[in-house]
Image (spheres, rainbow, N blue to C red):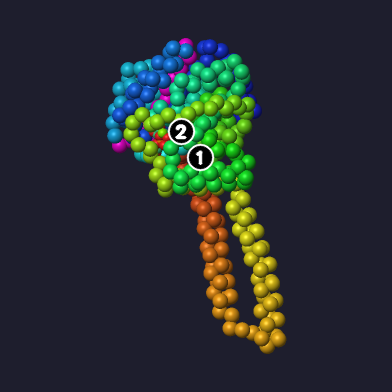
Amino acid sequence: METIQSIVDQERSTNSILSVVIPAYQEGSHIKNSIGVIETILIENKISYEFVIVDDGSKDNTWKELESLARANSKVTALRLSRNFGKESALCAGLEYASGDMILVMDADLQHPPELIPQMVEAWRDQGYDVVEGIKNSRGRENPFYHTFAKIFYYILLKTADIDLENASDYKLMDRKVVEAWKQLPERTTFFRGMASWVGFERKQIRFDVAKRVNGRTKWSAYRLLRLAMNAITSFTSVPLHCITILGIIIFIGTLILGAQTLYMKLSGRALDGFTTVILLQLFIGSSIMISLGMIGIYLTKIYHEVKGRPRYLVSNCIKGGGKK
Ligand code: UDP
Ligand code: MG
């Protein structure tokens, strides 16, 4: 296996090939249009390119559209996963099939403005950056609940894992060597944004406004978002586990003080029927133990999934541009 150190910098020229990786789930109604828009911009700017589009087990006509696209256009590779594995896994598949000198990851719904691509490619080619990342100017219209939730999530990640993801997006252009480094991270449960930040390298940020979704609906339910957030935090930091220990110590100190006071009352014959204290203590200790166990459980589940070592995704179909298998 190639090691990270042995990867040498490629020559960056106007002939360098850009791989555009797009995960698509239930995007049949507009995927052809989206690719058309992106392709026009690439051609106008004389960028050599290939598309790797991953159908993440869609139940609509996404695969049919991709199939006809890949057969007609030699620059399009269409991959189909055997079921819906989630965007993270679809991205992994795309990155592993991409063969360009630089790799761009973007959404299928044109929320990541393709007009920025020439600017990103230029930053890679002429300014020598290894990662050019799109940063959201605003988070668009969002309900206040999500907004607060997102803020807390980013704050925890920044403070505990030193990873700043506020306004970060999955819209990123990466040099081949960054993708190779990323591919060597062995974890099964991936969090692209976090991992792409963890690997480091020379980075440049480009701001953009999130456009409106061209068609269809967002696939992120509250439950999916919560799961992603939990996954992200537990992937990058074990601080929550240490918090449990600290909480334990604090409770222990409290116990010493309260214990001394109780004993004193008892010995001096002034013991009251302190039911309130008992109930409060029971509630407090009971809930802290449950929270702590839950937290350990989350990490344990992660270890369990990693130990099983199942593949991140399964490919059921692959059409390389022009219809060749
Ligand atoms: N996506 C995917 N698998 C999923 C959910 C989403 O591949 O299970 C893709 C989707 O097709 C799109 C991108 O991930 O290209 C972003 O999804 P979406 O637009 O629904 O998310 P949002 O823009 O609302 O964050
Ligand atoms: Mg979207």
Q: Pointer 2: what residue? A: 91
The question of residue 54 being in magenta is answered with yes
Q: Quadrant of ligand 2?
A: top left
Relative to 34, does residue 193 appear above or below in the rendering? Answer: below
**Label ID, residue 134:** none
Q: Quick one: SS at disc 1?
A: loop
How many residues crowd mark 1 within 10 Å: few (<14), some (14–19), many (20+)? many
Quadrant in the picture for residue 218? top left
Residue ID at (52%, 12%): 15
Q: Where does label 1 land, which residue?
A: 190
Picture quadrant where residue 24 is located: top left
Tags 2 and 1 in contact by the CB under 8 Å rule?
yes
Against 263, residue 96 (above or below) is above
Magenta span contains residue 14: no
Location of residue 286 by image quarter: bottom right
Q: Nearer the viewer, residue 168 or 101?
A: 168
Q: Which residues are magenta?
A: 46-59
Viewer-proximal residue, 164 or 244?
164
Quarter of the image that includes the C terminus: top left
Q: At label 1, which amino acid type do we have?
A: Thr
Disc 2 is placed on an element classified as helix
Disc 2: residue Cβ within 8 A of ligand 1's nearest atom: yes
Residue type at the position of mark 2 = Leu
Decide if residue 309 is on the left or right side of residue 181: left
- In x, y percent, where is residue 159? 62, 45
In the rendered image, which quarter contains the N terminus?
top right
Q: Residue 243, image x and y in percent?
A: 62, 55
